[in-house]
Amino acid sequence: MVATASTMLPLGSKAPDFTLVDTRNNQLVSLEHIKSPIATVIMFLCNHCPYVKHVQAKIVELAEIYQAKGIRFIAISSNDAEKYPADGPEQMRLEAENCGYSFPYLYDETQEVAKAYKAACTPDFYIFDKDMLCVYRGCLDESTPGNNKPVTGSHLQSALDNILAGTPVHAEQKPSLGCNIKWK
């Protein structure tokens, strides 16, 4: 397992639109149609990454809390499912079901969406404001497998709380760290 840092999409970047299949129900989902008028969190995840597994319960918890406040969460897996069958659409559906994902879990088969977002690792987190401009990109919190820091979700939570309070998100942000996206 090689730790890869996120590439940190420039703040203020417009969210690239996409239409992908939600593996939970096999329906097409378009960012344009499901974005939030408050803020939208886009997360690049996968099924097998130990970094994702490490924070998965906190992601589900935060999604439940903030979705109730009008913020939309969207997860995307862009891994090459041919080389990594554990990250294929059917396995994604089962993962979403088993972990209680209350948000879409989209499959980026062509990997075009990951490239458009300059995603590099899983997990990789982005928050876009009401105008779909990037106000946060980086890590969930300071915890990674083996560093003995608690999984708190503090970085993502702080950014979301600022958005809800109408205050600027702090521009100093730390990159996410995780498994590299499995490119074709």
Image (cartoon, helix red, strand yellow):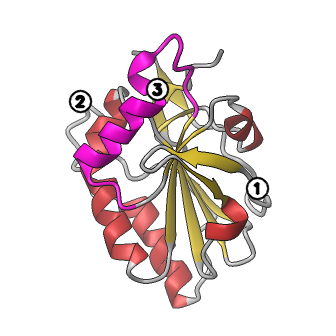
Residue at left offset 58%, top offset 89%? 166
Q: Quadrant of the N terminus?
A: top left
Report which residue position mark 2 lands on: 146
Give the residue type that dot 3 points to: Gly
Q: Which is more N-terminal, label 2 or label 3?
A: 3
Range of the magenta residues? 78-102
Report which residue position mark 3 lands on: 88
**Residue 85 visible, this orientation:** yes
Magenta stretch containing residue 91, yes or no? yes
Residue 42: image x %, image y %?
56, 55
Residue placed most toward the observer, 91 or 171: 91
Please state if 39 lies on the left or on the right of 19 as rendered.
left
Q: Are marks 3 and 2 in contact (CB under 8 Å)?
A: no
Residue at left offset 42%, top offset 83%? 69
Q: CA distance from mark 3 to mark 2?
A: 27 Å
Q: Is residue 40 above or below residue 76?
A: below
> What is the number of the mark on residue 36?
none
Give the residue type that dot 1 points to: Asp
Report which residue position mark 1 lands on: 17
Name the residue at the top extreme.
83
Q: Which is more N-terminal, label 1 or label 2?
A: 1
Residue at left offset 58%, top offset 45%? 21
Please state if 23 lies on the left or on the right of 99 as rendered.
right
Task: Please tell me whether mark 3 sits on a helix, a strand or a loop.
Answer: loop
Q: Is residue 21 above or below residue 87?
A: below
Q: Is residue 166 above or below residue 120?
A: below
Residue at left offset 58%, top offset 85%? 167
**Residue 143 visible, this orientation:** no
Q: Are marks 3 and 1 in contact (CB under 8 Å)?
A: no
Task: Please tell me whether mark 1 sits on a helix, a strand or a loop.
Answer: loop
